[in-house]
Amino acid sequence: MDNDVKEFEEKEIEHEKALEVAIEKQDNEKLKDIVEQMHPIDIAIALEDSDDEDLTYIYSKLNDEQIAEIIEQADEELQIKMITLLEASRAMGVFEYMSKDDIVDILGILPLNKRKELINLMRSGDKKIIQELLGYDERTAGGIMTTEYVAVSDSLTIQQTISKIKELALKTEVIDTIFVVNHKKELIGSVDLRDILVAPYQESLQHIMNENIISVTPETDQEKVSLLVSKYDLRVIPVVNKRNSLLGIITVDDIIDVIVEEYQEDMSHLAGTSVEETIYSPIKDSIKMRLPWLMVNLVTAFLASFTVSMFEGTIDKVTALAAAMPIVAGMGGNAGSQELSIIVRSIALGEASLQENWTLIFKKALLGIINGAIIGLFAGIILYFMYGNIYLGFIIFASMIANLVIAGVVGVLVPLTLKAFKVDPALASAVFVTTATDVLGFFIFLGLATLIIHRLV
């Protein structure tokens, strides 16, 4: 299996180099041949650093369908570049091979004047659909749905349904799931294409449809949609209005994009960075995205420093405390990070909330006591042998328990509290948890040392 993957990757690299050479030499035959062999996503990646001249050449040699496939797979920056370079009339031809939701995503990132120019050239029916989709928040079900689906009346027979599917198939994105509506155009069921194909021609569609429909409204957050799709193992989920009329569908490929996007966003927020930042971002943009969080971290660092300064006299008398402080802070920070990663992931999966899971606090406190006792015992023994003072070992033992309890409790409380106030749990959790473990950890450790200072000197 590893050899197969390696061989595939080597072929990918070979194709990318061949594409670059074909564009550079403007070898028309070679270009068409290599494009036929490559996946659109690989072509899009290979074109990320292409200049306007190269893209213009490619446009002149590829057909609208090939261009559409490449644009669909390109990142936002390349999409803007490619659409901007296209003549408006050619862009309309390219859009003919793209689904409505992909068109809306692209139009949403274009400059306003270019967007208006393209929308004005659309047919009235398409223009109305596009404008409606553009009206939805891009992070909601309405913002990621497509209007290209097959919906048939519940009064049809299987034979009539098959005829209807053949009529609509070329204009839709998904045909393996057929939606069923009544005379009021309300969504009442769905049926798999496989079930239609094996049913007798004269059978009524009502008899084989599934009436247990899981649907969402256009305002439903995309993350909640992805949880529903994952939970019920759906290939497609319908979007309905308050009257239960079918507005559109969300396909599993769009859900995968949402999951990846939400994961990247959560990881970036936990690290105090932005999902928009990449290794290729200009220094100015990186500074703008990172500096605010670094300033917040500086403030929390001063809080920890202030806590330590309160016990300068104790540290002056027992210099071994200075060597032991990083152990307390480091272990507390690591335990807090572990807790955060688990809780933020659970929140993302819809498994945790402050109202329903408040008993987690006690569980995490108990976990902190156990882990803290084990780690603290090891640390205490090592410090005893290093400095020959059993009381120093006792202090590190007690402090470790207390700080890991703090890490567990705060690691649960902070993200769940932020979620209760409708703030992204990943956004500022790490700052609060790190501050709590540093400040309180130092205070407990140095406070205990101050209380029994006569046993340490």
Image: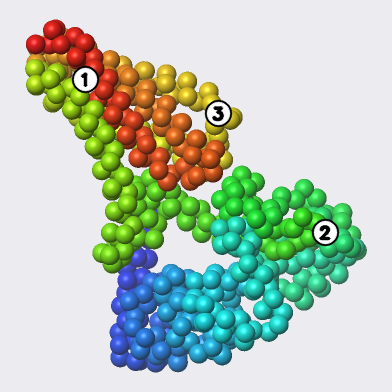
Query: Residue 120, can we see it?
Result: yes
Considering the image in quadrants, where does the N terminus appear? Answer: bottom left
* Image marks 2 and 3: residues in contact by CB distance under 8 Å: no
Q: Secondary structure beneath disc 2? A: loop
Q: Position of residue 105 (x, y in %)?
A: 54, 69
- Mark 3, residue position: 357
| 199 to 392, vertically: above or below | below
Reply above or below: 71 against 21. above
Marks 1 and 2, how far apart in space? 68 Å
Q: Amino acid at mark 3?
A: Asn
- Residue labelled with disc 1: 446
Q: Amino acid at mark 1?
A: Leu
Label 3 SS:
loop
Instruction: Using the rendered view, name the quadrant where residue 340 is placed.
Output: top left
Front residue (pair 16, 129): 129
Q: Which residue is mark 2?
A: 186
Task: Kindly identify the amino acid type of the residue bearing the numbered disc 2.
Answer: Glu
Pick the residue in front: 355 or 123. 355
